[in-house]
Amino acid sequence: MSGSSTASGAKNAKRALKFGKTYVVGPKGKHQATVVWLHGLGDEGSSWAELLETLPLPNIKWICPTAPSQAVTFFGGFPSTAWCDVTDLSEDAKEDLEGLDASAAYVASLLSAEPPDIKVGVGGFSMGAAAALYSATCFVHGKYGNGNPYDAKLSAVIGLSGWLPCSKSLSNKVEGDEAARRAASLPILLCHGRGDDVVRFKFGEKSSQKLSSCGFQDCTFKAYTALGHYTLPEELNEVAAWISSKLSLEGPQS
């Protein structure tokens, strides 16, 4: 399954972005939740679909899309699968709002077909984590960066080895009673390795601190001493336990 983003958040995009193949891992038990999982820069959905299928979460449907292939400034303009353009990994890097909006809109479009009684969430690794956290801020704000309404109702957000895009303007998105309520009640799990030499540990730590200071009261940050820019069974087990708890999933025998 593949297609171009046509969701409301991206319909005014200036550049055409064609998303790649989407891989779906169906629930092995009673379907209670659906999570869109976003891969890292240069990867594709299949690698994470294979990994997520091994988790002891029989009640979750995983949707693992593949990002569009586009020029990435960080790679000298060479094309790569990417959820947005990235110039460099620094706090002053220029944000690709158009790309972030398009990716958030694509996530919302993938979740829009889920039954109303199914809880939905988004997670990701590295750049995928950044895109997932941007989706979280769109949900809280009620709209994309371009002003179009954001309709998905997220119940959980996970970011592994990533960072928070547009952190400097986050406080503006949490203004108002409804936005504050959404921020306070949205569970977020961030995990980061102290040995990460690609997305430095400090970016993950500062992202968590920024979310907490802006009213995200259910934000958990897990640090892993020996972890680099990859994932470990210990970390994935933590993710599985957290999702099961936050989404009140039934046990493996359901």
Image (spheres, helix red, strand yellow):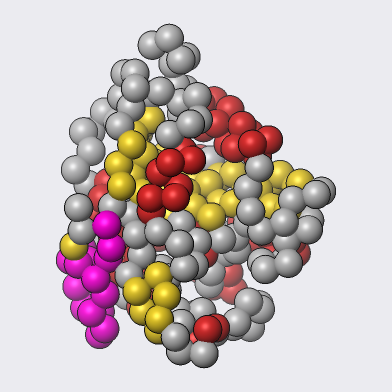
What is the chief secondary structure element of the magenta stretch? loop
Residue 244 in the image, given as x and y percentages of width and height: 51, 26
User: Which residue is nearer to you in this view: 97 or 252?
Assistant: 252
Q: Residue sitting at 59 percent across and 74 percent down? A: 168
User: Which residue corresponds to the image point at 59% horizontal and 37% vertical from the top-left?
Assistant: 236
Q: Quadrant of residue 205?
A: bottom right
Query: Is the residue 56 above or below the residue 72 in the image?
Result: above
Whether residue 121 is visible here, answered yes or no, is: no
Residue 150 percent location from the top left of the image: 30, 58
**Residue 8 sits inside the magenta stretch:** yes
Q: Relative to residue 106, is residue 6 drawn left or right? A: left
Q: Quadrant of residue 87?
A: bottom right
Total marks placed: 0
Above/below status of 87 relative to 150: below
Residue 7 point in image, percent of width and height: 20, 63
Instruction: Classify residue 139 as left or right of residue 215.
Output: left
| Magenta-drawn stretch contains 61 | no
Magenta span of residues: 4-21
Observer able to see residue 192:
yes
Q: Is residue 182 left or right of residue 17?
A: right
Foreground of the two, 33 or 138: 33
Q: Which of the pair 120/79 is nearer the observer?
A: 79
Quadrant the C terminus occupies: top left
Q: Is residue 232 above or below residue 140?
A: above
Q: Residue at x 66, y 66 (%)?
A: 199
